[in-house]
Amino acid sequence: MQEIGAALSSFYTDYHRVINIAIIVVLAVVANWVLRRLLVRTVTQVVRGVKKVQDVDTTSEMYAAPYVNARAVQRTRTLGTVGRHIISWVVVITAIILILAQLGVDLGAVLTSAGIVAAGLAFGAQNIVKDILNGIFMVFEDQLGVGDVVTIETVTGTVEDVGIRITQVRALDGTLWHIRNGEILTLGNSSQGWGQALIDITVNADQDLTHVSEVTVKAARELLTSPKYARKVTGEPQILGLESVFGDRATLRLAVRTRPEAQWEVQRGIRAEILRAFRDEGIVLSDERPNLPGGTA
């Protein structure tokens, strides 16, 4: 045993730097894995806890204090995503410093040089610094979160990842867009607060528009009282008025306030119900429909 101990001691003495570096690398990998797992578990528990209290499967179905609870879930997911990036960077930088110390590098001189180099890089790589700062502010100001439906410039889709420098958005056609945080100047978030379903109904102008309005509102109310849609709306359907008149066509606009992200599903459902009600009442839709925002029935 003494000989084995002496041999191991001699081996460590000869190769202590290599051994210490290997130990640092292993500990860094393990620490990164453990910390990320703990963060993911914490985020998952928070999300499950909120959904369990609300007795829902998806965030958009929350009904008691929907904005507060839904944003708590989205914000927790986003901070978890950013936290994973920060953990990786901190572990890697710490491991590099410890490895340099094992190699006998003067850390004081390295840190001084690093400060000078960082200043030079900050001046020369202003776009990267801008991306990082803008990403940090977007997260802490709750401008967007993982799972939010957003519109950034011409891209509309669901946020899949918010990184330190890049935000990933999955477009409606499945394309994954990588958007630099520093380039996000205008951002629309459809998952905050509330949504509004807008349906334009274009009919022949010689019809009784009062009757058309009544049938439209009645059809929308019947649909929205069904179990499938009742929890997706927060207001009553109402006709905003005559949106436009063009030749022999008249366009009425129906509006319904909804939960965030539910406006598109409500719009599709109401359009189908209006078509059915119009057939029953003999109301004729116009053959030619103007290109108006919100879509036409």
Image: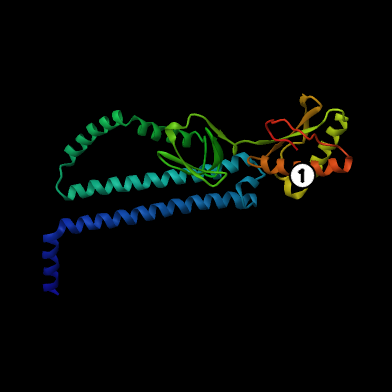
Q: Could you say which is closer to the camera, residue 145 or residue 239?
A: 239
**Left or right of residue 281, residue 112 in this image:** left
Q: What element carries label 1?
A: helix
User: Which residue does the numbered mark 1 point to in the structure image?
Assistant: 272
**Left or right of residue 157, residue 248 in this image:** right
Q: Quadrant of the C terminus?
A: top right
Asked which quadrant contains residue 179, the reply is top left
The residue drawn where x is 86% and y is 37% is 283
Q: Which residue lies furthest to the bottom in this view?
A: 1
Q: Hey, what amino acid is under mark 1?
A: Ala
Asked which quadrant contains residue 82, the reply is top left
**Left or right of residue 38, residue 75 in this image:** right
- Number of numbered markers: 1
The residue drawn where x is 79% and y is 24% is 247
Whole-percent x and y of residue 260? 63, 40
Q: Could you say which is closer to the camera, residue 293 or residue 94?
A: 293
Q: Badge 1: few (under 14), some or many (20 or more) residues near its Cα, within 10 Å?
A: some
Q: In which quarter of the image is the N terminus?
A: bottom left
Name above or below for residue 86 compared with residue 33: above
Whole-percent x and y of residue 240? 76, 28
Whole-percent x and y of residue 47? 55, 49
Q: Could you say which is closer to the camera, residue 133 or residue 171?
A: 171
Please, which colouring scheme is shown? rainbow
Whole-percent x and y of residue 225? 78, 45
